Image (spheres, rainbow, N blue to C red):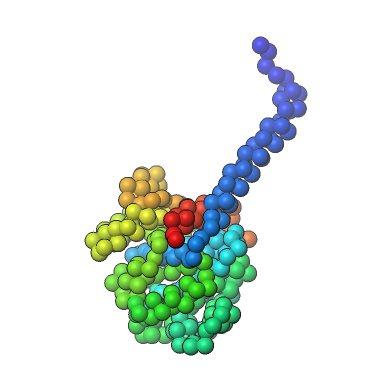
């Protein structure tokens, strides 16, 4: 049988391209359907890392912004970092209110009362800031965290908590006790992987094994040209302990450490955030 001529192959190209586009569209639609799985009540996510500077806050904001953009329900991120957390710097500042101001407000009766204490990005993600005074932030307690969650659970469907790097801080017991799932962020470097391993071991030995088996590990390339170990080998190692592993590639906009605008995020990183959102949403159906 003779091969098709160049002209015939060129004539068939639109059909082939059309089929590829339909397949790509179908895959994207399936991904969006996963992201938009319904929640009964609220779903709480703790974002952890024992090592600073690996992209924990960036992952929190990127994931929260993706959920807020693609879903119709309310999404909020809470800064529970006792060491001058920077979460509030990643969205436009609309209020100087903090977690303690929310607790102190005894007049909260409706969503708009809570909204007065949060800042909101154009993508609809809201942020509740931590205390700006180091001593005040350090003393943020488990009881106070539980009070914050008791309020937010009444008005928000997805609640992310950006944690500090210490697991023994007072608020962390409340964070871990109330979390439905955890995201453990690490760098694609040996020291980051060791810190992630240490975190999982600590959680297992302190009664949080259920969070470990349901955890999602995020390998965040927060710096251009950062030292790397074999990503496939790293993923295989952690898949024996966690539910899933995702890699978020380096992105110049995310690396700026400033206000996050998803429209400025490059396609690879934005796709990675969407896939991470879908994996997290896969777990939402088990929550009653």
Relative to 128, say whether 3 is above or below.
Answer: above
Q: x, y percentage for residue 173?
A: 32, 71
**In this picture, residue 265 sits left or right of residue 209:** right
**Res. 164 in view:** yes
Query: Residue 247, relative to residue 104: is it above or below?
Result: above
Answer above or below: position of 192 versus 117: above
Could you tell me residue 100's position as x and y percent? 44, 84
Task: Please say whether residue 257 is visible from this viewpoint.
Answer: no
Judged from this view, the residue extending furthest toward the front is 288
Camera-side residue of 16 and 282: 282
Quadrant of the frame with the N terminus: top right
Answer with the quarter of the image where residue 177 lies.
bottom left
Which residue is at a point 54% across and 80% down the rendered structure image? 114
Please give left or right for residue 227 compared with residue 96 in the image.
Answer: left
Quadrant that contains the C terminus:
bottom left
| Total number of numbered discs in the rendering | 0
Residue drawn where x is 48% and y is 66% of the image: 42
Q: Quadrant of residue 26?
A: top right
Q: Give percent across and percent down for residue 273.
A: 52, 56
- Vertical position of residue 282 compared to residue 169: above or below: above
Q: Which residue is depicted at the point 47% across and 55% down?
A: 285
Please indicate whether residue 242 sits to the left or right of residue 106 in the image: left
């Amino acid at each position: 049988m003779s091969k098709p001529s160049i002209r015939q192959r060129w004539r068939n190209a639109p059909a082939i391209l059309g089929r590829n586009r339909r397949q790509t569209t179908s895959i994207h639609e399936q991904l969006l359907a996963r992201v938009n799985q319904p929640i009964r009540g609220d779903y709480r996510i703790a974002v952890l890392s024992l090592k600073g500077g690996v992209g924990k806050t960036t992952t929190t904001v990127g994931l929260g912004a993706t959920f807020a953009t693609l879903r119709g329900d309310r999404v909020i991120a809470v800064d529970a970092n006792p060491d001058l957390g920077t979460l509030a710097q990643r969205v436009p500042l609309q209020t100087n209110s903090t977690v303690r101001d929310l607790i102190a407000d005894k007049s909260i009766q409706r969503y708009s009362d809570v909204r007065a204490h949060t800042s909101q990005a154009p993508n609809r993600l809201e942020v509740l800031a931590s205390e700006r005074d180091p001593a005040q932030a350090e003393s943020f307690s488990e009881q106070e965290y539980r009070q914050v969650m008791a309020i937010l659970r009444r008005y928000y469907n997805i609640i992310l908590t950006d944690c500090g790097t210490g697991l023994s801080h007072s608020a962390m017991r409340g964070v871990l006790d109330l979390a439905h799932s955890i995201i453990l962020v690490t760098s694609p470097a040996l020291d980051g992987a060791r810190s992630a391993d240490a975190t999982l071991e600590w959680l297992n030995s302190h009664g949080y094994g259920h969070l470990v088996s349901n955890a999602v590990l995020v390998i965040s390339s927060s710096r251009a040209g950062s030292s790397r170990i074999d990503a496939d080998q790293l993923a295989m190692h952690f898949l024996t302990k966690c539910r899933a592993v995702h890699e978020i590639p380096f992105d110049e906009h995310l690396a700026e450490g400033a206000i996050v605008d998803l429209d400025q995020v490059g396609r690879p990183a934005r796709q990675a955030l969407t896939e991470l959102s879908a994996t997290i949403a896969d777990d939402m159906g088990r929550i009653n």
